[in-house]
Image (spheres, helix red, strand yellow):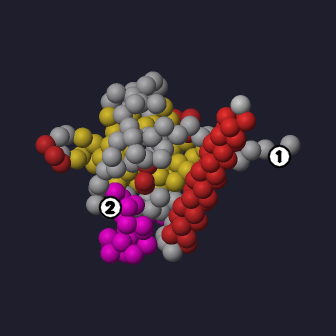
Amino acid sequence: MKVQFILLLLMTFASLNCQNKQEINNGKNDIMKQTAKADNPYYSRTDTSKLNLPDAVWKKVLPADVYEVARNKATERAFTGKYWDFEGKGTYYCAACGNPLFRSDAKFASTCGWPSFFEPMRTNSVLYQPDNSYGMHRIEVLCGRCGAHLGHIFDDGPPPTGKRYCMNSIVLDFEPDSTPAK
């Protein structure tokens, strides 16, 4: 009985230790992301002016993984992005420029492996262009401010729009709604 208790205690401590390390690692990632944004003078959640910068500039100010998706139109693997099954309440922004894109109340569980929304935050939050790559006909969704590749839109979403904005997590930043002070 004593040995089982000690083992249980050790397992609990190990579990808490792993959880604390994960929280520390998440904190380090957040700090690294904030530092990356500090190095990006074009990132603003309030400036709505259009950005028309050469890719060489974006390559200098964006983290490599964000650059690959935003500028080279790469796609993260399904079920690997941090927002595909995330349920927080708040606003999603373009990770390249800070443009407000989607509200969490427009997000739905599409089971496709990427975060999905049925409508953008504003009509000019995103732009659309035909994408005929890989022998498919799709509509690409771009950031309305900086032209970053975000993902694609499909006609299999829920009401009221019937649209599914299938986005890459890596090109999204999330800001939770502030909770009112009690």
User: Where does label 1 land, which residue?
Assistant: 181
Kindly state the secondary structure of the residue where label 2 is placed: helix
Compared with 125, 29 (above or below) is: below
| Left or right: 17, with 86 as reference point | right
Q: Tell which residue pokes out farthest to the left in this image.
A: 135
Foreground residue among 88 and 152: 88
Across and down, in percent, residue 36 comes to 51, 69
Foreground residue among 162 and 151: 151
Question: Which of the image's four quarters has the C terminus?
Answer: top right
Q: Is residue 101 magenta?
A: no
Compared with 62, 86 (above or below) is: above
What is the spatial separation of the Cα atoms under label 2 and label 1, in whole angstroms?
40 Å
Rendering quarter of residue 118: top left
Q: Give the residue displayed 28% in from the left and 42% down from the top.
A: 139
| Left or right: 182, with 82 as reference point | right
Q: Which residues are magenta?
A: 48-70
Q: Tell which residue pokes out farthest to the top in this image.
A: 159
Across and down, in percent, residue 132 comes to 18, 46
Q: Tell which residue pokes out farthest to the front in this image.
A: 2
CB-based contact (under 8 Å), mark 2 and mark 1: no
Mark on residue 68? Answer: 2
